[in-house]
Amino acid sequence: MASATPIHFGFVRLEESSSPEQSVSGLELSPTRIEAPASVEPKDAKDPEGFLKRCSGYNKKTKLRCGASIGKRSQQNTQATYLPTCSNHRDQQSFAGWCQHQHAGGKRCGRLFRWVRPYFELCGDHQGLPDSPCYFLKLPLELRHEIFRYLLPTKPIGSSTAALHDGLDDEFDAAHVPNGLMTARTRALIINPHHVAPPGPGSVFPTPLVDLLLVNRQICHEVKDLLYSIATFTIDVRKDGTFMCGRRLLEPRRADGSSHFLADEADEAKERFLRTFDWAAVKNYSVDILLENWSCPPHQTQASTWDEEVEIYDIRDYVSVVVSGILAKSHHLCKLQVRLCLADFKWQEEQIMTNAKLIVSPFERLRNVRQPHLAGVFFGRPYHNSMLSVQRPPHSTTKGPLNPPPICSVPPFLTHLPVMLPGMAAFDAYTADWARCMSASSSAPVCKKPPIREMFTEFKDFYSKLSNIVPDITYRNGRHTFLHRARVAREQENVAQFRHLRNELIQFWYAYVEQEERKKTDMNSRLSKMLDTDTYPSHEWEESSNPTRRNSSAAQSPVVLNALTMAKEGIPMTGNHIAPSEHNFGEMQLRQYREWHRLMRHQRQGVPAGVQYQQSQDLARAHHQEAQYYAQQQSQLHAQNIAALRELSTRRAENANNGVTSITSSTSDLYAPPSSSLLRSSADTALTYQTVNSQLLPGFNPNASSEPGPSLTKKQKIDSGIEEAAYGGMIAHTDVPMGVAVDVNVNGVETLLQGNSSSMPPPITPYVGKGKGKMEM
């Protein structure tokens, strides 16, 4: 029986097989069994790397640790300064570190490791924990500031961040220098232009400032204080506005104060910058002023609205705001440097000095400035002379938006062509007085504003509002505008000129008020005429369904035809019979009420129109709200009509006996107020005729829903009989000749219009026959 020899693969042993012929594929592997070597000793938790038992040195050739054993003396319970080594590696001494980390229970770790000073005495498992002690804060503040200086910028912090604004393309151009202003230094620049070092590209911060400020609160405060103390912040003043740290703090605006641009994320970033920036801590500023000539070239025929004086005062206004709004907020302003650059101006030296004084004179209001310095006046225009928007990279360490709002970038200040520098007599004389005013001691950082500045502020506010009402004041250009003339008087403190200009602007307001008053008076007059022409019955007094009203268009129409007018127009009306108009009781009442309202209106001529309208409305509203008002007026007018009818019949009888053929009535008799006792007019007769007609024969009303009436012939006879009964039989047909009609005009005056003088037909005998049309006499 053949047996197989056990084959050991590490700690794997093959069992014997009973098969005489055993192939490799037929071998069965037994479960693995790992046997620990007998010589391996358990590791010490305090010394897992065995520094106390083995040499801590390294072989210089193999770079491996030496494995030589150390004697028992090295295993004594003592904390040695250096790790033990063998005799061959005594020159490789390493500090022995015992981990000082304390667990939650207060027990110290105490693990032995190779310690590299000056790092913390912590093992690899306990390094970088949040509760690790910070020995950097135990250093003196002066030493920490020296360390921070390596991380803060050494160049001025400006707004030239775009690649086009790196200053490399701004070459020297002698054409910008006016004749007679070539200096020795300017000639040297022409010969060796490379001596002028342009600003280098890249960020001015060696390390991201945000990363440094996010270490902790104490380091953040210390870095900010040091940054505001040693760094110089540049303020760029130009026609586009005022820029600082990539934000446009000031921008040109319209006359009414509105902006030329829409609000965007850049404006929100600017507002946040104004709130969070520590203006009081800044100690160093550099103000760069660029004055540009934007007039059209001589070869262009188009008229230019640009004005040199207006441009100078615009820049001066920006400088004034910088002085009072930025520089005056600094508690300890140490260094202030001011530079002026002129672009494309053909001025002589005297004119340059005059305009330079006008621009930089607002700085003289500052006080307590330790080192004010007017660097000089330069000539030149940047090659890429435009403001650009630069998108900043996202901040992954902050909690803000991933894409921060863009910042503004402007060209750097050009110093290639100096025109006025320290060393010139006139320039040094003015600079000395300029610096003396600013370095004077005072309790306030800026001088008190004169009262004329407050006057200008209110003047500008009044002008902005008035320009929306009276656009004529904005039709002035250049130096003739109100705001420019006002600010010139403000800067010169010319109170007399300012008051004269203010009175001139006030006259525009008074003229506008007078014009509006004339418009108001004219519209009130037209409104009164429009209301007076309305003689139609009001819907509040008309009855929706009147059974006594006829269906004919002549009865429903309120228009009364004028015979003379129609004759002039060529309209024949001789053969047309004009039936007497019918007026119901409500129409007569409305006419009387209108006359009474007209009399009351004449009594209120001295009352304003608005009060008259309110009184009329209140009176009408009060009448409408009274439930018994209409009924009382009806009963009163009915009684008055009966009395008037009796008196009219008596008068007609007397006139017939005396030979009088017509009766005329005055306007007061025809239209008396509701309180009148007598109503003597032909209109009353017509009203009485209609009332009697409705009372005598209500069954013959065409609109009444009753039995059918008589035929047309019978009805004519009945109507004639009713008319005779209504007039008391006293109306003679000769009183009114043929063609005479009754006309009631818009004022309620009754007139007789003379027509044809033909006589009327003989009177018709009332119908007294039989049938449904029979009338009892």
Image: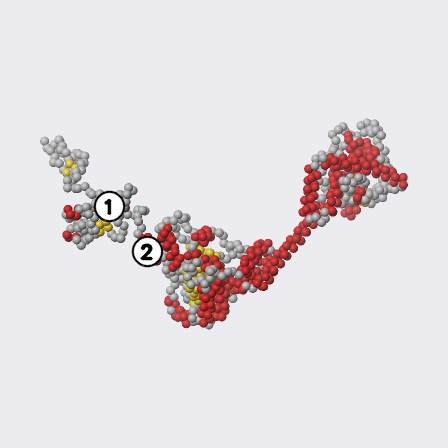
Q: Nearer the viewer, residue 572 or 566?
A: 566
Residue at position x 41%, y 50% in the image: 403
Q: CA distance from mark 2 to mark 1?
A: 30 Å
The local secondary structure at tag 1 comes to loop
Residue that carries the numbered disc 1 in the rendered image: 110
User: Is residue 552 shown to the viewer in this render?
Assistant: no
467 on left or right of 71: right
Left or right side of 518 for 54: left
Which mark, by number, is residue 140? 2
Neighbor class of circle 2 (other Cα within 10 Å; few <14, some 14-19, many 20+) is: few
Res 28 quadrant in image:
top left
Q: Nearer the viewer, residue 351 or 449?
A: 449
Provide residue 185's location: percent of width, then percent of height. 41, 70
Please give the name of the residue rendered at 68% of the width and 42% of the height, measured from the top-left corner.
618
Three-letter code, disc 1: Gly
Q: Nearer the viewer, residue 575 or 680?
A: 680
Q: Is residue 597 left or right of residue 771?
A: left
Decide which of 519, 297 is in the foreground and name it: 519
Name the residue type under label 2.
Pro
* Mark 1: few/some/many CA within 10 Å (<14, 14-19, 20+): some
Name the residue rendered at 42%, 63% in the picture.
370
Which sits earlier in the primary sequence, circle 2 or circle 1? 1
